[in-house]
């Protein structure tokens, strides 16, 4: 039965091969609501916000190591909790290509492996959309552990994550630097495909990656902490990909028939 299921899945993919696509270019823009973001974090030792964005890194930071992202442009006095806050809106993370440069020490910048049938994104989406850039937060706890990095993110359609937060969508943003975790749950997502332009818009919520900072209560209460927008160009997948899948289907079917015999 297992072999039969594999064949059935492959056949389903082949049925949509004429419409198979991936994405190229574009960017994700995050707009964090400063006060709402801080309100759900249960670490607040001073009058300063419990958490805020301290630094933003664009795609040019791909060559920096984890330590360089953690330590760059930080104040000498790490007990000054209100130092270096920057705007948390309009933070842009560009879409990676199908390949990325070798990662520096402790970095995990990912290529884009996303594929889908434009006629039915929800039922066919697989793989990830790699995003370049990152940001660093200041948290209201004692140094030196009062800085949190989020970088090398991916945007993905993963229905299994939807079960962890009641009203969230299957779309999630993962953090991959430091530790792999869901950075943001995405709510109220609207998806539009106009010609070759794919856009997503909606609200941001805490991912379970913030739970260690005390956000679990706010997360499971479906707290909204900002908005996001995403736009990219849809491009057909190379025919060779689907030729390979066709061959794999043939081998799978042959193997199943042999075992049955």
Image: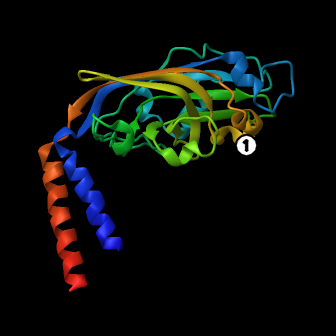
Q: Is residue 77 visible?
A: no
- The x, y position of residue 93, in whole percent, is 44, 25
Q: Looking at the picture, does residue 27 appear above or below residue 4?
A: above
Residue 246 sits in which quadrant?
bottom left
Q: Helix, strand, or loop for circle 1?
A: helix
Horizontal relation, residue 22 to residue 242: left or right: right
Taking depth in this image into account, of 148 and 97 the one nearest to the observer is 97
Horizontal relation, residue 129 to residue 40: left or right: left
- The x, y position of residue 187, in whole percent, is 56, 29
| Quadrant holding the N terminus | bottom left
Q: Looking at the picture, does residue 160 appear above or below residue 235?
A: below
Looking at the picture, the colour scheme in use is rainbow
Residue 215 sits in which quadrant?
top right
- The x, y position of residue 83, in whole percent, is 72, 17
Farthest bottom residue? Answer: 261
Q: Looking at the picture, does residue 30 appear above or below residue 173?
A: above
Task: Determine which residue is flagged by label 1.
Answer: 212
Report the residue at 58% width, 26% height from top: 204
Report the residue at 68% width, 32% height from top: 147
Report the residue at 12% width, 45% height from top: 239
Q: Residues within 10 Å of mark 1 (few under 14, many from 20)?
A: few
How many callouts does the rendering have? 1
Report the residue at 28% width, 34% height from top: 118
| Quadrant holding the C terminus | bottom left
Q: Is residue 35 visible?
A: yes
Q: Looking at the picture, does residue 153 appear above or below residue 27?
A: below
- The x, y position of residue 24, in whole percent, is 28, 30
């Amino acid at each position: 039965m297992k072999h039969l299921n594999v064949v059935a899945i492959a056949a389903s993919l082949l049925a949509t091969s004429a419409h198979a696509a991936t994405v190229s270019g574009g960017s994700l823009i995050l707009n964090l609501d400063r006060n709402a973001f801080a309100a759900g974090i249960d670490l607040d030792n001073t009058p300063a916000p419990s958490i805020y964005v301290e630094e933003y890194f664009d795609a040019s930071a791909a060559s920096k190591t984890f330590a360089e992202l953690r330590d760059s442009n930080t104040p000498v006095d790490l007990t000054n909790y209100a130092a270096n806050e920057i705007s948390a809106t309009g933070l842009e993370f560009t879409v990676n290509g199908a390949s990325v440069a070798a990662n520096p020490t402790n970095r995990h910048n990912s290529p884009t492996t996303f594929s889908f049938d434009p006629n039915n994104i929800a039922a066919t989406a697989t793989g990830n959309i790699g995003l370049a850039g990152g940001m660093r937060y200041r948290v209201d706890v004692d140094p030196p552990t009062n800085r949190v990095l989020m970088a090398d993110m991916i945007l993905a359609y993963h229905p299994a994550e939807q079960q962890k937060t009641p009203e969230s969508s299957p779309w999630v943003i993962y953090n991959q630097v430091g530790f792999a975790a869901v950075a943001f749950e995405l709510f109220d997502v609207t998806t539009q495909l106009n010609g070759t332009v794919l856009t997503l818009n909606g609200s941001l919520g805490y991912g379970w990656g913030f739970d260690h900072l005390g956000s679990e209560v706010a997360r499971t209460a479906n707290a909204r902490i900002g908005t996001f927008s995403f736009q990219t160009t849809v491009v057909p997948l190379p025919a060779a990909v689907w030729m390979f899948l066709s061959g794999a289907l043939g081998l799978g079917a042959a193997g199943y028939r042999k075992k049955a015999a």
